[in-house]
Image (cartoon, rainbow, N blue to C red):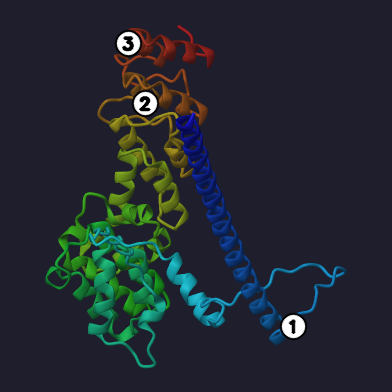
Amino acid sequence: MKQKNNKDISILLYALLLFSFGIGWIYSKSARKLNEENNQNNKIETLADATDKTITKNPTKAPDPTKEFTKPEIETPESKKTPEETNTNNTEKEKPKTSSIAIPVAPEPPAEITYDIEKAEKDEELTVNEILIYSKELVLSKNINNLVILLKEKCPKKIILDVINEIFKRDLINQDLTRYEKLKIILALGNYYENDKQLQAQIFDILTKYKDLENGKVPLLFAAIEIKESSVIPALVDWYKKSDRPDLRDIAKLTLEYAAKNDFGPAIKKLHELGVKIDPEYATQLLWINLKSNKTNKKSILIETLKNCGASLDSQDKQTKLTPLIKAIKNKNIATVEKLIKFGANPILSSTDKSVGFPLQVARELKQLDIEMLLRSKGAKD
């Protein structure tokens, strides 16, 4: 019995020990939580005190609800800069980044060399050397038209002959001018000084100093037409007539015969209009020169031009006894046959030489059916 009581007492003591230990643990936990809450409250009070002090020092008004809200400007380093500095910075920002590698740039093509009239402006007269300096660029660039303008407007009259001769020298320019380029210079300047006959003749005399100018493949008067200086032809013809050299007096004849041989009807017409004399007998000679070359085509105006100068379209060659029409048939050139008949050739006229026969007979023998039909349409009969 006594032992049982001792056991109950031990259990009770053990329970009391556990109870006291639990009470202590709960108390320590509550104390710790309370301490944390006190610390948090102290922090809030400290922050509130600091806020109250700031508001007291810098009081602010409440925003007016009736006014539109605007975002407050914040001062930055950029806002302190002047407008000039801002523009400079923007420009620098817009500049593209450059590579450290140098990229080659293609050179610009050289500007075309042209004559600038202001380049030669001077109060005093230019010298030969000064004119040649300006002329050299124009000669090298083959700008002959502007070279002529320069010589007309800036070259003193008294040195024009010296300048022309110097330009024509190869050692000055180191480049040959063509025959037509030289003729352009001489004929244009000769025409420019038409009121000074002595100087004009002296300019034309330069032609006799250069064989390529005087004896070119194309006669001078014809060349004048080709380089569009035909207005100087009357002066050239007059100069030829007054020349001491007999061979130069026939230059007009040589030009006309060259034009007839090559069927250059417009050249003959132009020369005739400019005063080159073409009488009926010589016009007939030119017609035969053209027929023998057999270069007439449908667009040719040569037969019409010579007819207007008095050429006989029914003449007869002294050697062959052929008429122009029979000669054209033998050439098998229907364009010439058409033009001869159109401007008055007799389609039934026979040669005085019976062995030659009639135009229709010749066409039939040569089996030129088109020409035969054309002759029959114009009245030719067997």
**Vertical comparison of 301 with 325: above or below:** below
Q: Which quadrant of the figure has residue 369?
A: top left
Numbered disc 3: secondary structure: loop
Q: Amino acid at mark 3?
A: Leu
Numbered disc 2: secondary structure: loop
Whether the residues at callouts 2 and 3 have beta carbons within 8 Å, the answer is no
Q: Looking at the image, which residue sits at the far left?
A: 171
Q: Residue at x 39, y 43 (%)?
A: 283
Q: Earlier in the sequence, mark 2 or mark 3?
A: 2
Q: Which residue does the numbered mark 1 point to in the structure image?
A: 59
Q: Which residue does the numbered mark 3 point to in the structure image?
A: 366
**Vertical comparison of 358 with 181: above or below:** above
**Vertical comparison of 275 with 48: above or below:** above
* Disc ID at residue 33: none
Where residue 269 appears, x then y in whole percent?
44, 47
Q: Which residue does the numbered mark 2 point to in the structure image?
A: 323
Q: Residue at x 33, y 79 (%)?
A: 198
Q: Earlier in the sequence, mark 1 or mark 2?
A: 1
Q: Is residue 271 visible?
A: yes
Where residue 274 appears, x then y in whole percent?
45, 57
Numbered disc 1: secondary structure: loop
Distance from disc 1 to disc 2, alpha carbons, whole Å, reads: 131 Å
Q: Amino acid at mark 2?
A: Thr
Viewer-closest of 129 and 156: 129
